[in-house]
Amino acid sequence: MNLDRRLLHLLIAARGWFAAAVASGVGAVACTVVQAWALSRAIGGVFLRQETLRSVSCFLALFAGAAALRYALNWLGAAAGARVAERIKRDLRDRLTAKLFALGPEHVAGGRSGELAGTLTRGVEVLDAYFAQYLPQLFIAALAPLVIPGVVFPRDWLSGVILLVTAPLIPLFMMLIGSTAKRMTDRQWQALSRMSAHFLDVLQGLPALKLLGRAREQADGVALVSDAYRQATMQVLRVAFLSALALEMLATLSTAVVAVELGLRLLRGGIGFELALMILILCPEFYGPLRALGARFHAGMEGVSAAARLHEILDAPLPPQSVAAPAAALGQSPSTIPHPPLTIAYSSVSFAYPSRSAPALASISFELRPGEITALVGPSGAGKSTAAKLLLRFIGPDSGRILVNGADLAQLPPEEWRRLVAWLPQRPHLFHGTLAENIALARPEATAADIEAAARAAHVHEFVAKLPQGYATLIGERGARLSGGQAQRVALARAFLKDAPLLILDEPTSALDAASEAAVSDAMQRRAAGRTTLLIAHRMATVRTAARVVVLDGGRVVEQGTPAELLRNADRFAAMLALNVEAGA
Amino acid sequence: MIRLLALLRTERGWMLLATVLGLATILSGVGLLMTSAFLIARAALRPSIAEIQVAVTGVRFFGISRGIFRYLERLVSHEVTFRLLTRLRVWFFRAVEPLAPARLAGTRSGDLLARVVADVESLEHVYARLLAPPAVALLTALLCAWFFGRWDARLAWALFGALFAGGVVLPLVMQAAGKRIGARLVIVRAELSVAAVDGVQGLADLLIYGRAAAQQEKLGALNREWTHLQRRLTSLNGLGEALLGLCQAAAVVALFALAAPQVTRGALDGIMLAVFTLGVLACFESVAPLPQAFQNWGQQRQATQRVFAVADVAPAVPAPLRPQPLPETHDLTLDDISFRYAPEEDCVLRHFSLQIPAGARVAIVGPSGSGKSTLAQLLVRFWDVTAGAIRLGGCDLRELEPHALPRVITMVPQQPWLMGATLRENLRLAKPDAHDTELLGALAAVKLERFVDSLPEKLGTWLGDQGLQLSGGQRRRLALAQALLRATPVVVFDEPTADLDPATEREIMDLIWSLDAARTVIVITHRPIALDRASQIVRLG
């Protein structure tokens, strides 16, 4: 019946409004009974008792009054249901947001981020129909049928039996056919989703198809796939719509059976006309809530499956040392925060991702010294980014320690620690806002001059100057698109503006051409003075700026020293450099 | 809107059938209640059983027919919807194909194209959500009014008036009332979704730059406004539904007040009093979907405008009036060409000349922004030069039939695109009649042989968004395999090694330079590596 215990648990917060929604629904059904009685009395009066319009006008007024009350209750019910949905969605979204932020980037970033952002918006939205419509309707459908037979039974037990016997069949059919249809759609889901994605896919591929001389004939392909999609979907729908057929059939056939049965008994004088007419009018009203429930059955199914995803996120275990834990919660006093200059030592640090068997880092030790650039190099998958993430406190070491000026990093409150860190990620995120806002992320109070200085240092100013709106240009999700290299330089300016004693740069020049690469490397070197810098790189042009190089491979430190020393050893570093000299010549 | 309907008139037979079935469904409901009322009222007068036999049959018939009509109507209207979708897609594809890629924003921002496609797809509902509800409601109202009017014209007007008030006036009033909330809702939804994406994808940056709490607060504020607005809109819709119910009750009272005196006077059979009253109750079912149709109207109109705005753009590369046949020789001449993307923009290329004899190995290098990729796109006529001319075998590219050019020049783009289809189908895009052995041969040449062997479904493996995700290097190699299969006399590679690690970079370049010596190879790159085998190196910028 699409009742999810944990979703129902959410109702507790809004139980008052929910009760109001259900009560007004049941009240409205009671009003329909009054309406039916008044109307059949008025009709019967004029039809059989030779009464005039004037003499039955009180019944007509009662009908109108009951109708007014009924629809007022309906409105109240809708408004109350809307309040339930508002309250629950708001709380749920707030809790999800807090949870995602607490889980931290390690859990949230990557391929699933789009899906998670969607869950936060649309995923919660699906519950609107569940709480505002489906759930109240479910309770009303369970309670309302008791009201009408309650009125009908004492007066005419035969019609009452017909109503009571047919009513439970409706939800039964709904469930039976609903689950069959669901199995069919599930089975065809992959084929269907591939076909529905085909059109956009081909349109996006138009330039490529043109290059292959295959663009024009794809129109036939579009028609073919669309037709195949239609046929496959119709096949599913033929079964899926059977539930609607069964519902309609039951409701209308029962009405027909009641009408015929009433007519035959009227013929023999077994029942009065007005009672018979009242039962006939109530018949569609009786099936109404059940049919409404059928119409919202889908909303119920969607709600429950969306809820499963939401609970999955809410139940995800927090990382051992919460990356977003407030400083106070850790009981740390700010005095333990180290003062720059910072000397950082990795001491036998190991880390393994839960999803992978091999450790990402196996007991690595090296040191970052103030005023120096330390370059971390190695093939992809060597553990370079993992080492940086540990320093950023997105993850914590499984064993070993990272010491900052001799103090264990794990003992520092993450928020306080991150004040000392500026970071250029491999794929920086540009926020929806102006270029200036994006650069000034760390210091919203920065002046235009500060921003421009950072932008010049990161070679952002050159292309910003060419934009018609300069630093006021909107970028990000719905703004102008920047190339990968431009985005990286904006993030570099962001890191420069923060002016923190520890600078972590993850492949800062991967999307740049040779000239920009050299310019940015220069800027980095100037910035490194007086700071501690960790540089992750696979391009040698940037590595040459480093005072020290740590070569990682398979999660282990295989070599370290100055670039010159490593070159003399003619080992791995030298081999990598050779490949790159050729590449970067 | 009219253009849209004209486009869709091919499906009018199906639409008519769906409308008739929709009408039949509603009328069955009306018929069921009216014949039932007739049956009971007639039976109350205690005639012989034979006299109510017809009514009993009618009740049974409508009792069964309604469900069946409803089922058929839903099937046929979905059939219509999917047929319209096919029609719209094919039409849109044909309209947009000449525009790609120059006039199609898709090359620069994929989501814009995705939005237009979402618009195209939303128009599939134009029948079921926009045309059908008013058509069925109007026909129901006319038929019921006609039926009532056979007894008394005033009854017909009262019924029609009530249906009009509930089905047309009320939705319009409610829509006007909800307009402000609706407009704000659209804005807040967009802001919320941006804030969610920023919060999730930018979480690392937010944490490092101390802005996580601020972002969380922003999300919370948007969340509160969004849910609050939605609550108000839902309540408003509830009010609309309640008012429609009141219209229905008012119609019953009005009909009764009109008919009752006539029954008293003996001008109207008392049985009909019951029939009319229940008939009124039943035919309001037809106007219930109208508020939704009114809401859809605005959305569908805007979607239609956006779709036609794209489809109406003039192509950037017009087809020649008298196309020349493809030339026999394949020397390329770039004769003093200049190019800019739009009249108000700066020239990307200025007075550039270059001779590329057939069979040459040319490397075109230069920093980013120097117009290299533009040059590649000019060679395959994605754009036309602003001044000067590009000649192939002495013949201006603009004189050639645009669809014939790919038979001579293949370009491997910077970001190779793979269709959501099997590996085999992707390769066959390059050579439709190629046999599996030929495909495997091409894969072997680009050193993908072992990779394909490792796939459980070999050439039948599904690629693209919903299939196997390939690495950048693998995509490049596949594109290279396509180029091998095509075997055109000229091949252009746009940045074939960007984002690749040095070892892969080297391998790909080796493959490119060792293409069959009769073919012209043009490599465009910002990374001047492995160019030792080029016969000609051109620097741009």
Image: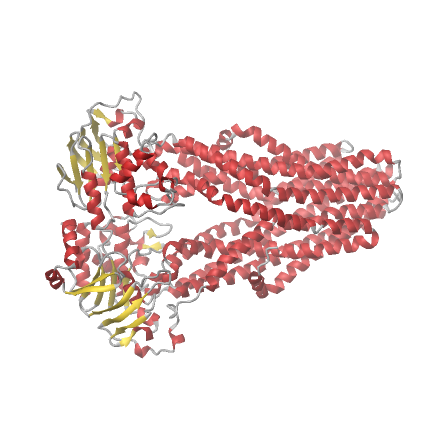
The number of numbered badges drawn on the structure is 0
Residue A357, percent across and down?
34, 61
Asked whether residue A64 is in view, the answer is: no
Does B483 sit left or right of A583 as displayed?
right
Q: Residue furthest left?
A: A568
Asked whether residue A49 is in view, the answer is: yes
Place residue B490 in its image quadrant: top left
Q: Nearer the viewer, residue B59 or B135?
A: B59
Residue B439, percent across and down?
31, 35
Does B282 sit left or right of B431 as displayed?
right
Place residue B253 in its image quadrant: top right
Residue at the image position 71 percent from the left and 55 percent from the top: A144
Residue A556, percent across and down?
24, 64
Does B368 sit left or right of B228 as displayed?
left
Image: B11 above or below A167: above
Residue at the image position 16 percent from the left and 52 percent from the top: A579
Does B478 sit left or right of B231 as displayed?
left
Residue B129, percent across and down?
56, 40
Q: How is the image coloured?
A: secondary structure
Q: Nearer the viewer, residue A434 or A235?
A: A235
Image: B325 above or below B456: above
Residue at the image position 20 percent from the left and 42 percent from the top: B509
User: Could you tell me which quadrant the C terminus of chain B lies in?
Assistant: top left
Q: Nearer the viewer, residue B317 or A170?
A: A170
